[in-house]
Amino acid sequence: MVRYDGMRAKDLPIVRNLIPIIMKSRAVNTAEYSTQFDLSKTLPYIDRFNKNLYKQGFERKNRLKFFHVFLCAISRTISLHPQMNLFIE
């Protein structure tokens, strides 16, 4: 489809193909943030935590995963900086 008001962006990640399916109209808002985080202390911490967990007799299904750390970081960020969670119409 050719549009007069812009050019098609190329070399985007495949996941971007889902955006039109998830966001049904142009009025839907999205915010993107691209950065790199240093995980040199986080990943060894997760390993140590899980090893200690097994020593205490907990099952494998109870192990800490990076996703848990990520969710905690997002939760803390929103609770400590509520001004970031605003929508201005």
Image: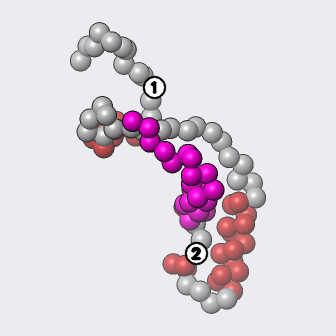
Location of residue 24 by image quarter? top left
Magenta-colored segment: predominant secondary structure: helix
| Label drawn at residue 63 | 2
Would you call the spot at circle 2 few (<14 residues within 10 Å), some (14-19), or many (20 or more)?
A: some
Q: Amino acid at mark 2?
A: Arg
Residue 63 position (above or below residue 79): below
Q: Is residue 36 above or below residue 60?
A: above
Q: Is residue 43 visible?
A: yes
Q: How is the image coloured?
A: secondary structure
Quick one: 44 or 68, which is closer to the camera?
A: 68
Circle 1: residue type: Asp
Image location of residue 69, percent across then percent down: 61, 62
User: 23 above or below 2?
Assistant: below
Identify the residue under disc 1: 11
Q: Which of the two labelled residues, at mark 2 and mark 1, occupies the earlier sequence position?
A: 1
In the rendered view of the protein, which quadrant contains the N terminus? top left
10 with respect to 51 (left or right) = left
Residue at image point 45% right, 25% down:
11
Q: Residue 64 in the image: state x and y as whole percent.
A: 59, 71
- Rendered location of residue 7, percent (x, y): 37, 14
Residue stretch in magenta: 68-89
**Disc 1 packing (10 Å; few <14; some 14–19; many ≥20):** few
| Furthest residue in direction bottom, as rendered | 57
Residue 57 among magenta residues: no
What residue lies at 72% left-to-right and 72% top-to-bottom? 48
Please name the residue shown 65% across and 81% down the image: 53
Residue 85: where, in percent of width, then height?
51, 48
